[in-house]
Amino acid sequence: MEIERKFLVNPDGIPSLEDYPKHEMAQGYISTDPVVRIRRSDEKFILTVKSGGLLSREEFEMFLTKDQFTGLSVHVQGLIIEKTRYLIPCSPYTIELDVFHGLLEGLLYAEVEFPSVEEAETFSPPSWFGREVTEDGSFTNAALSRLGKDEVDEFLKRCK
């Protein structure tokens, strides 16, 4: 079970990122309904299947070889999403700050995963978090992957 809240981020308030671990990611979607995603995270390759839902949903992950990842890549529909993910401690949780690249350059958001819905609902975000977008399905990476260039520009304007 994945339970997470998602927030836009105020870029002026972000702590210095050089002190935090990061992962370079590229991901694409073979299907967005149901969500079937392939992801490269540094030199790891992962296939993920997610159920419907925004705050809480089932998630299954399986590691792939590089060859399996490459073979599945030809089935990706829409944008390949490229981002750097920073892991920032926020005791007892970890903030996953995604800094997007390519067509989505300028988009920043933070996700925080929780062990229970109750903990998610009582979480107080740090001051550098902006508007919460957990319940806005247009902020899922699956939805972002379906945007065309003109739609990306309009989407990024909505994030400000």
Image (cartoon, helix red, strand yellow):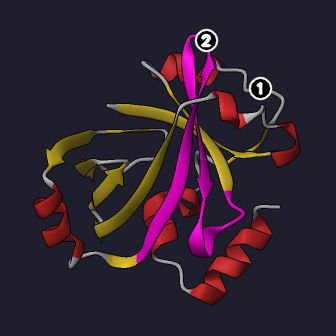
Q: Is residue 75 above or below residue 56?
A: below
Q: Which residue position is annotated with label 1? A: 126
Name the secondary structure under disc 1. loop
In depth, the one of 42 and 142 nearer the eye is 42
In depth, the one of 108 and 32 nearer the eye is 108
Residue displayed at 42% across by 63% down: 142
* Dominant secondary-structure state across the stretch colored magenta: strand
Crowd band around label 2 with a 10 angstrom C-alpha radius: few (<14), some (14–19), many (20+): few
Indicate the position of residue 94 as horizontal and vertical percent values: 55, 24
Q: Quadrant of residue 71?
A: bottom left
Amino acid at pointer 1: Pro
Amino acid at pointer 2: Ser
Indicate the position of residue 25 as horizontal and vertical percent values: 43, 53
Name the secondary structure under disc 2. loop
Indicate the position of residue 72 as horizontal and vertical percent values: 17, 69
Q: Could you tell me how many numbered marks the image carries?
A: 2
Quadrant of image for the N terminus: top left
Q: Is residue 58 above or below residue 36?
A: above
Indicate the position of residue 87 as horizontal and vertical percent values: 55, 31
Who comes first in sequence, dot 2 or dot 1? 2
Q: Which residue position is annotated with label 2? A: 91
| Disc 2 to disc 1, C-alpha distance | 11 Å
Residue displayed at 12% across by 62% down: 67
> What is the number of the mark on residue 98?
none
Quadrant of image for the C terminus: bottom right
Range drawn in magenta = 79-107
Q: Quadrant of residue 120?
A: top right
Look at the image and say whether residue 144 sits in the magenta stretch: no
Residue 144 left/right relative to 31: right
